[in-house]
Image (cartoon, rainbow, N blue to C red):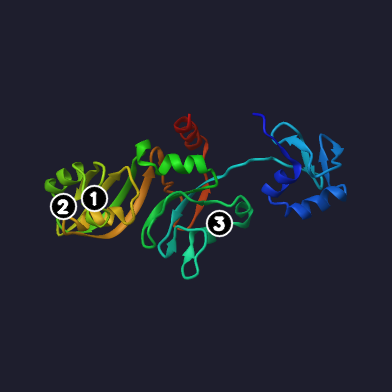
Amino acid sequence: MKKMMRLDKILVNMGYGSRKEVKELVKKGEVKINNEYAKQASIKVDAYLDIIEVRGEVLEYREFIYLMLNKPKGYISATEDDYHKTVIELIDEDYLHFKPYPVGRLDIDTTGLLILTNDGDLTHKLISPKSGIIKKYHAEIDGRVTEKEIEIFKNGIYLAEEDYTTLPAKLEILKRGQMSTVHVFIQEGKYHQVKRMFESVGMKVVELKRLSMGEIELDVDLGEGEYRELNRSEMEWIQKIME
């Protein structure tokens, strides 16, 4: 992989400070390229092939990060907000200089799988209905879900507020009764979509948790509010859908 970039941009991207602060690092002789002191912060280097050292520490450059978060209730899927806690507040400082953001959104009271990244191309791929990537949810429903609702969801549901009919969705009934437990599979991410789909058939979503996006499944070892980087098999799936 060849990635020629200005040295100062690389160091800024990796969290070593502002352009001004990075320039000062170079000036002080604290940056080496292939074991030679860098003379200018503006020189272009190969971010992946050249050996870059800062204060004696070899830099391992990467442009993008990919995190899996088990989103808890009470946090909104945003990078900043004046009134609510955001999912970014759950992320350690070591990742924040990459400027990650949530892929799509989960409502403030919805829990489960949320991908955070700074890769715009992947974000578009994951949230675009044209990609056909299925999002799976576990839901507790106030109402008796039957085969009738399965058929209605399969045919798409009309959302009057947007004058829009959803793409076909799959509904699996796990428990029947006045309170039903179901799995919902959708290809889109309209505002409050799952809740609005059930409202259209006279039912209310009491609890909602996203379990998966495509082949990326929520890690059962992650407690609410915990996160990790995507593992090798998950990244292989991402590379596959991006080809």
Q: How many marks?
A: 3
Number of the label disc, if any, that sits on residue 145: 2
Crowd tier of the residue under label 1, counting other residues whose Cα lies within 10 Å: few below 14, some 14–19, many 20 or above: some
Disc nearer the start of the sequence (2/1): 2
Circle 3 SS class: loop
In the current view of this chain or complex, which residue is farthest to the bottom? 83
Give the Cα distance between marks 2 and 1. Answer: 8 Å
Q: Quadrant for residue 143, please give it.
A: bottom left
Disc nearer the start of the sequence (1/3): 3
Number of the label disc, if any, that sits on residue 91: 3
Query: As shown in the figure, which amino acid type bears the numbered disc 3?
Result: Ile
Q: Are marks 2 and 3 in contact (CB under 8 Å)?
A: no
Query: As shown in the figure, which amino acid type bears the numbered disc 1?
Result: Val
Q: Nearer the viewer, residue 198 or 19?
A: 19
Instruction: Determine if residue 19 is in view.
Output: yes
Circle 1 SS class: strand
Q: Quadrant of the N terminus?
A: top right
Q: Nearer the viewer, residue 215 or 103?
A: 103
Label 1: which residue? 182
Q: Is residue 180 left or right of residue 226?
A: left
Residue 231 rendering spot, x and y as whole percentages:
52, 39
Crowd tier of the residue under label 3, counting other residues whose Cα lies within 10 Å: few below 14, some 14–19, many 20 or above: some
Q: Are marks 2 and 1 in contact (CB under 8 Å)?
A: yes
